[in-house]
Image (spheres, grey):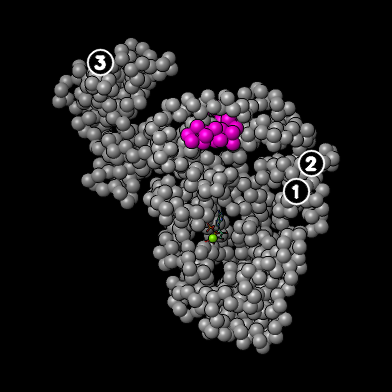
Amino acid sequence: MASSRDTNNFIEEIIERDNESGKYAGAVVTRFPPEPNGYLHIGHAKSIALNFGLARKYDGTCHLRFDDTNPETEDPEFVEAIKRDVHWLGYEWGDNLFFASDYFEQLYDYAVKLIGQGLAYVDSSSMEEIRKNRGTVTEPGTDSPYRDRTIEENLKLFGEMRDGVHGDGTHVLRAKMDMGSPNMKLRDPLLYRIKHASHYRTGDEWCIYPMYDFAHPLSDAIENITHSLCTLEFENNRPIYDWLVDAVCESPRPYQYEFARLNLNYTVMSKRKLLRLVEEKFVDGWDDPRMYTIAGLRRRGYTPSSIRSFAERVGVARANSRSDVGLLEYSIRDDLNAIAPRVMAVLRPLRIELTNYDEGKVEWLEAPYFPHDVPKEGSRKVPFSRNILIDRSDFKENPGKKFYRLSPGNEVRLRYGYVIRCTDVIKNDEGDVVELKGTCDLDTRGGDTPDGRRVRGTIQWVSAEHAIPIETRLYDRLFSVENPEEGVEDFTVNLNPDSIEILSGSVAEPSIANDDPGTRYQFEREGYFWQDPEDSSPDKLVFNRIVMLKDSWEKTVKAKPATIKPRAKETVPKEVRTIVDSPATLKMAEDFGLSVELARQLSKDEAKKAIFDAIAEQAGELSAAVANWIVNELPGDVQGIDNPGPFLKMVAMFDSGDISQRIARQIQVEVIESGTDPETVVDREGLAQISDPSTLEAMADDIIARNTEKAELYRSGKKGLIGFFMGQLMQASGGKANPEVARGIIEKKLG
Ligand code: ATP
Ligand code: MG
C-alpha cells in the first residue's frame, strides 16, 4: 500500500484509498451538477476545477449534469451560459452531458418502489402542518396522521398526483424515516411535490417534481457516480442520500463527501443574490465586468488559467472560510505578468509642448515589449514628437518633497524617450492647468543623462499627434466592505458607488492598432487592460482594466497571512460518521453555553476541537466567543496553542470591542506563536480600535465637509453611499474606527 501519496486534499486521499481497496475497480466518476437558474460564479469554478480536475488526474470521467428539477426558476439561457463557462474554463464533458429532467420517469419508478417497500408515504397535511409537526432542534417532531396509510392507498394517491388529479400543495410524498431524529433533515423529508408548472425541457408532461434530496442522490446513482462532492451545507442531508441510494441501488454505489464552499470577501456569491444585482440593475447584466461570475470575469479579461490556479491556491478543505479577493487578483496578475506585452497609454492626458523640439520632426524610438524579462524577444517603435501627452497625475504644480515626477522647473524622464523639463504652466480662467510647456534635453535620447545627473522619476507618455483615442473603464471592488452581508438587512447598501470609473478621453500609443484585438496588455504603470469584447469596436476602442498592478487595497486592508500559502492538508474523514448530534456535542453546547450549531461545527473539525479541548482543560471555562473564534477565524494550519493566555485575552479584547475583528485577525498569528501579550502588539503597531464618539465624529465631519456632493446625493436617497463614507472613515482612521459606532455616527450626521 502506498505510504506517501501524492495528494492535494482529503478527497484525493479518499479516492486513492478507494483505488487501493478496489472499491470501484479503479473507476473515478465525478460530476458537476449546476441548477440552470443563473450564471456560474467563481464559487462554482472551485467545484468545477475540483470535479473535472479529479477526473483528469485519475483518468476518470466528469459529468456535466443539469440539476433541473425546479420548473419555476430554470431557463435554457442558463443552460447555454453554463456550458459556455465550463468550456471556457478549459474542461470537457465529452459525451457526458446529462439532465436530471431526463430521469423523471426513472425517478418516478424509484418512488413507486420505495412506496412498495413501505419506505414512503403520501402526506395530505398542509405545508404549515408539516412545518409545525417537524418539531424543533430541541423537541422531536410528531408523526403525520397520514403516516400509516396502506401501501395500496399510497400507490393510488401517488398515481393520482402524477395524473394531475390534485392541486398544488394538497399532497406530498415523504420518506418514512424518523420524526424523532435529532437531525431535523431526517424527519420524514419531502420527496415529491405537486406543481402544475411548465418545465423548460419536459413542458407539461409532469405536474409532480422531485425534491433535491430525492433527485440528487438518485441521479448520481443512475449515472454510476463514484465520488459525489458537494458543499458542507449538505452534510446533514447525507444520511438521506445514503438511505435512498441503499434502498434502490446495487453496490458499488456513490458516496457523498463535503468540502467547504468558496466565499470571497467584497462580494456576494449565491446565484440568487447575483440575480438581484442583475434584475434590479445594480450592474449591467450577468457579464458586467465587476461581477464575480465566470462570464463577468471573462469579459473583464481574466484568463481561464488564472481562475484555475486561483482554485488550486484556495485548495479544498472542510473548514469554512472566506478567501481574499486579493488572491484572485494575485492569480491574474501572476498570469499576465508573464505574457502581457508592456505598452504605453495615458488615461488622463495633459499636453506638454517641448518648445526646443523641431516642429514636424518625428523620431521612432525602440521600446521592448517585455522590459522586465530581457531574454524575451519583441519590441515596437514608438513615435516621439514636439507635443507629448502625459498623465495629469504625473504633474504637480506644487509638489511635495517626495514627488519625483514633473513639476515647474523640474525634470522627469519619458520612458524610452528623453528627459524633459517643465518651463511653463498654462491655465484657463478657472485656474485649472490645461497645458504645459517645456524643453527636452536632446542629449538624453533613450533616457541616460550623459553628465550623470540624477533624474528620479520615469513616466509613460504618448505622442499627441500619433495618439489613438480610447475609452478606459476602471473597475474597483463591487462592494466597499469585506463581508457585504454582515450586520445589514439588505446587502445592496454596501455596494461600492465608485466601482466603475469611465474615462472617455484616454489615449494609447499607435502600435496597438496592429495587434490582435484580444491582446491583454500591461499599460505601463496603470495596470493590465484588454478590449471589452462587447463594447469595443475599431471605431471606438474600449479598454477594461483587468486588474491594477498592485493591490491598492493592501495598504488599508492589510492582506491576511492566509492569502498565498501552501494548501492545508486535511485528514480523511471517517467514511461512516453519524451526523445526528452526539451526546458529547450536546453536552459541549450546554457546558460552554454554545449554540448547538457551533458545537456541531466544532466537533466536526478534529484539529480545532482538539485545540478547543486543550484550552478548556487549562482555562476551566471558555466563552462562546472563543469557540466561535476557533471555528471561524483561527487559521487552519495552527496546530495547537501552547500558551493560551494571550490568545484568550485577544479574543476577549475583540469581544469587548477594544480591537476590531480585522485587527484581531491580523495579530493572532503573532499572539499565538510567540505568546506576546496582545495589548503589547496592539500598542506597538498602534492598532487599538477607536470607539470614542467625539474622535469619530470629528473624522466624520471632516469627511462629510470634503464630500458635500456625495452627502447631498445620500440625503436625496442614494443610501448606498453609506459604504463610501464608511470606507473614507475607515481609511482616515487607518482601519481603526469601530465600524458599528462609526456607521451610527455617519448615519446620524447624514440624517
Ligand atoms: P448558489 O447558491 O450560488 O445558487 P448552488 O449550490 O445552489 O449555489 P448549484 O447550481 O446547485 O448552485 O451548484 C452546482 C455545484 O456547485 C454544486 O455542487 C455546489 O456544491 C457547487 N457550488 C456552488 N457554490 C459554490 C461555492 N461557493 N463554492 C464551491 N462550490 C460551490
Ligand atoms: Mg441554489
Looking at the magenta stretch, what is its main secondary structure? Answer: helix
Q: Quadrant of residue 580?
A: bottom right
How packed is label 2: few (under 14 Cα within 10 Å), some, or many (20 or more)?
A: some
Residue 405, percent across and down? 36, 20
Q: Which mark is residue 594?
A: 1
Residue 459: x %, y % from top left: 35, 25
In this orientation, which residue lies closer to the viewer: 200 or 484? 484
Per the model, the C-alpha gap separating discs 3 and 2 is: 69 Å
**Residue 108: x %, y % from top left:** 58, 80
Tell me which amino acid carries mark 2: Leu
Residue at the image position 66 percent from the left and 64 percent from the top: 237
> How many discs appear?
3
Q: Secondary structure at mark 1?
A: loop
Q: Nearer the viewer, mark 1 or mark 3?
A: 1
Q: Is mark 3 within 8 Å of ligand 1?
A: no
How far apart in space, not on screen, are marks 1 and 3 (Cα)? 70 Å
Residue 424 badge: 3
Does 552 appear above or below 172? above
Name which residue lies at 74% across and 70% down: 142
Q: Is residue 567 above or below residue 658?
A: below
- Which region is colored magenta? 731-751
